[in-house]
Image: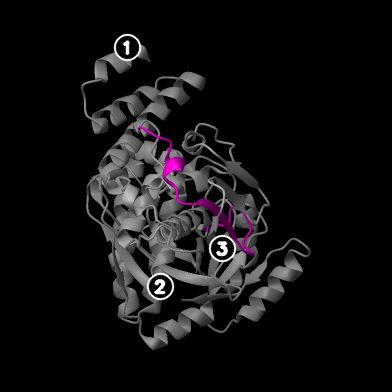
Amino acid sequence: MRVLDDETKNLSCRERMRIFSYASLFLEGKRQKSVLQTSFDCVREMIVEAGRNEISISQDSLAVSGDVSCSYPLRLNWCGTWTDTPPYCLENGGAVINAAVKINGILPVNVSVEKISEKKVILEFFDSGYRAEYYDAADLVDFTDSMDPFILLKVALVACGIIYMKGESYSTDLFENFSTGLYLKAGVKGIPKGSGLGTSSMLLAACIAAISKFFGAEIENEDLYRRVLLAEQLMDAGGGWQDQAGGLTPGIKIASSSPGNRQSVRVVPLAVPQSFFTELCERLCLVYSGQRRLGRNVLRKIMSGYIQNNPLFKQSLEEIGSLAPKMKNSIENNDFDSFICNLNRQTELTRKLDSGYINDRLDEILLACEELTEGRMICGAGGGGFIQIILKKGYTKEDLSRLLLSTFPGQGVDIWSYNFC
């Protein structure tokens, strides 16, 4: 490892990313894991360097404007999934089709920031009950403990420019510059963990937006997409930009970016014909599998395959990238059959990239629904959470619900209510 570090130290991050990823193919166990981690550290460095100046701290901006609260929807992903993920999007750009949704009639993502008299930071998740108090900025930039329940809230403070990134030099503790203390409370209402609906990214986006507004700064959505991308790299989650683009921007849309370490995401609402929208609402069912999405390192597996120029991964991702404009045309031309074909093709290609995308449990549910189903997609990275099922004509959501409840009694497998917003 030391020899590899020395030999590659003068190369670009992109070159080092590939060299270390290729080297991992010849190693096993801890050594393989360490070398692969270095490859993804290079990805993080590209994004951090591209975004560092955009979150520089202005001491003049630390005047509190007042208490803030906000609520946001989640997203349903349809076509283009994985093309928004670094390093693929950095080298090729990405394009996705998705939609913002309320679940069970509510906006699930909720954040509040309140002023407190003592100069400290209180972090709390109202959905889990976790709560902690911090009196030193240095404790808020330590993201080394992957089991720390407050990493997401800490990294939001960094990404909105209120706390310095670790490694940045500063002469005084930032707490000395606060005119007040800060109480950040966040959580997701009524959504099970591992849902595949983009909850973590949307929670990050909501926190960054609320904290910034608390200190008198409004952030445009395009900047917010990028800051969430940066924040997920800082906490080693490695996610892309489609979750925040899907939830922050209302409606059904296409989101796309061009190649570059600084990802500028352009979101364009689609001109959805009313008859298409009506049919979509009637036939698209959101089914909870009763199973939490497993903590598998799917992202690293897929992106490693891409970095290593594996033909299966490169060709599959290239075709996935072509599906978003095709689905855009299907929607705007009121071609529901073509929409279903694109959705099913995304599912097939994602399954090629990850054999666990539809596991035995999900397969059992899909098989039980087969006679009623014309289209299918697992939300997010798959492996659990929510399933999207498009009914065959002639069947209703009530038909599917009765089937699920009778086939999987007492297992929590049923249709959930959603509304496009």
In three-dimensional space, the C-alpha distance between marks 2 and 3, rounded to whole angstroms, equals 21 Å
Q: Mark 1 points at which residue?
A: 3
Image coordinates of residue 209 in percent, x first then y, are 42, 59
In three-dimensional space, the C-alpha distance between marks 1 and 3, rounded to whole angstroms, equals 47 Å
User: Badge 3 local density, few (<14 within 10 Å), some, or many (20+)?
Assistant: many
Q: Which amino acid does label 1 sit on?
A: Val
Image vertical order of residue 42 relative to residue 156, above or below: above
Residue in view at x 40 percent, y 41 percent: 233
- Mark 2 vs mark 3: in front: 2
Image coordinates of residue 185 in percent, x first then y, are 58, 56
Q: Mark 2 points at which residue?
A: 250
Contact between marks 2 and 1 (CB within 8 A): the answer is: no
Q: Horizontally, is 371 left or right of 323 in the view?
A: right
Magenta region, residue range: 171-196
Image coordinates of residue 76 in percent, x first then y, are 47, 65
Marks 2 and 1, the one that precedes in the sequence: 1
Image vertical order of residue 381 relative to residue 288, above or below: above
Q: Which of the two residues, 150 or 225, is positioned nearer the viewer here?
A: 150
In the image, is residue 185 part of the stretch drawn in magenta?
yes
Image coordinates of residue 108 in percent, x first then y, are 57, 66
